[in-house]
Amino acid sequence: MSVLPPLQQLHLAHDVSPPNPTDVPQDLLERILETAVHADDPCREVAKLCGVKPEWLRWCRSGWMYDAANRAFGYYGKYKSWDAIAAAYPSLGSATPKKYFQVACKARLDRNTLVKNLTWAMHPFFMARLLQQARSKDGISLAVVPNIGGNYEEVARICLLRDADEIQYVQPYEPQYVRLAKLAVQQKAMALRLVPHDTQSYDKLERMQRQFEEQGRQYYGLTRAEYANIAVLAAQQDGKSVLKFITQFSHHAHDILGDSYQLVAAAAVQQNGMAMKYVKEATSWPIPLMRFMTRNAYIEIAKLAVQQNGEALQFVQLAEGDDHNEIARLAILNDAGAIEHVRQTHPSWETLKRLADEEGKRQAEAKSREFRENYLPSVIADLLKEAGVPNN
C-alpha cells in the first residue's frame, strides 16, 4: 500500500459525489487535448471548457470533467483511473478528481521547487506535470529533473530541442543517454564537447557495463562505439568544428575513437572539405599517421575532401606521387583554382596545369550559363515589378 505525501487541500466536503465512471465522449477528449494539454495554466483552460455546453457544465459540477482531464493529461500516472488512485492512497479520504486535478495542474515544478521539495516526485501526476512544465514558455532544466522513468525521455527531448547543451545533465549510463546525445548533436554539433570524451570516463563506464553483465542485466549506456556514432552525427552537422575539437585531444582520438576516427574524419570532410585541415594536424609530426588510420584510408578521406571543396588540396599531406596526382586531379575538376596548391616542381605539373586551364574555362562557362538561366531572369522580374511594368 502506497502512502502519498500530505495534500490536505485535496479534501472536500463529504456531500460531494464521486464522478461518473462512464467513458469520456470523443469530442470532449479532443477538445481537452487540443486546448489545454500544452497550456501554461491547464486549470484555467479546463475551467473554460465548463462553459462550452450546458452538458459540460453539469460534468464539471459532478467532477466528471476533471476525471476526464486527469486521464487525458496522464495525471493518474501508472494507475490510469481515479478508482485506482483512491485504492492506492487511502489517505486521500473524501478527495475528488476535481481537487486532485487542481493540485496537479497548479504544481510549479521549476528549478527552485524541485531542488527544495523532491517529494513532488512521489505523486502519480509528477511526470505528466513535469512534461507540461517542460513544454511551457518557462521550460525547465534537466539539471533538476530526476530520471525516475515515465516521461523522462520525452521531457529530456523537449529540453534538448530548446538547448542542446542540456545533454550535460543526463547521466551517460542511463539507458536513454545515447538516443538523447544523438539528438543533441543533431541540434547543435558542438554539444559533442559535453559528451564524455576522456579515457577515465570510459574506463568507469566499462566497469559499470561488466557489473551489469555479471548481474545478468543489459547495459544500454554510453560506450566507445556509441561515442563514435555520436561523433559522426555531429561531424555531419559541422565537420570543421567537430574535427577541430577532436584534434585538440590527440589522446582522445586515439584512445576513445580508435579506428573509428577515420569514420568521423570522413563524415567531417564530406560536410566541409576544409575540415581536412584538422586531419592534417591530427596526422602531422609528432603523431604518426598510422596511429589514426591507414594510408589508404587517409587517401580516401582526402579524395572526399577535395571533391567537396577543391581548396582542401592545400591540406593534403602526401608525397607527390600517383596518389597525390589523383587527389589533385579531383580537386581541379571541382575547382580549377586548386591548381594554386600544386607546386610547379610537381612531376605532373604540366598535365595538371593543362587540366586546370580547360576546367577553368568550362567552370566559368557553367557559372555564366547558370547566371543567365536562373539568377538573371529573377533579377529582371524584380526590377520590372518595382517599376510597375507587366512581366509577360
Image (cartoon, helix red, strand yellow):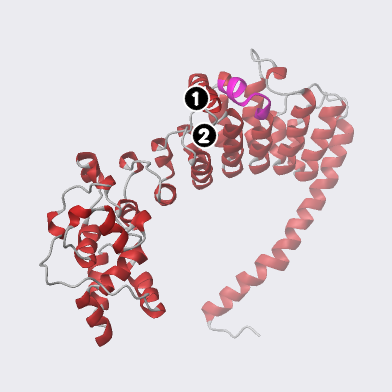
Task: Please state if 354 lies on the left or on the right of 260 as rendered.
Answer: right
Say which quadrant the C terminus sits in.
Answer: bottom right
Question: What's the residue at 27%, 74% (across, down)?
Answer: 65
Q: Amino acid at mark 2?
A: Gly
Where does label 1 land, which residue? 208
Q: Amino acid at mark 1?
A: Met
Q: Is residue 288 magenta?
A: no
Vertical placement of residue 203 versus 40, above or below: above
Question: What's the residue at 22%, 49% (across, down)?
Answer: 4
Vertical placement of residue 331 versus 317, above or below: below
Q: Is residue 310 visible?
A: yes
Task: Please state if 103 lies on the left or on the right of 359 as rendered.
Answer: left
Task: Please state if 375 lies on the left or on the right of 353 as rendered.
Answer: left
Mark seen at residue 333: none
Disc 2 + disc 1, Cβ < 8 Å: yes
Task: Please state if 87 lies on the left or on the right of 157 as rendered.
Answer: left
The magenta stretch spans which residues?
Answer: 252-261
Outermost residue on the top side: it is 286
Query: Residue 133's quadrant in the figure?
Result: bottom left
Q: Position of residue 195 (x, y in %)?
A: 48, 33
Q: Position of residue 338 (x, y in %)?
A: 74, 38
Label 2 element class: loop
Where does label 2 land, which residue? 221
Q: Nearer the viewer, residue 94 or 212?
A: 94
Q: Nearer the viewer, residue 119 or 377?
A: 119
Q: Is residue 38 visible?
A: no
Question: What's the residue at 13%, 61% (across, down)?
Answer: 11
Q: Nearer the viewer, residue 172 or 181?
A: 172
Q: Earlier in the sequence, mark 2 or mark 1?
A: 1
Q: Is residue 259 magenta?
A: yes
Tell me if mark 2 has few (under 14), some (14-19) or many (20+) residues whose alpha carbon lies within 10 angstroms of its own: some
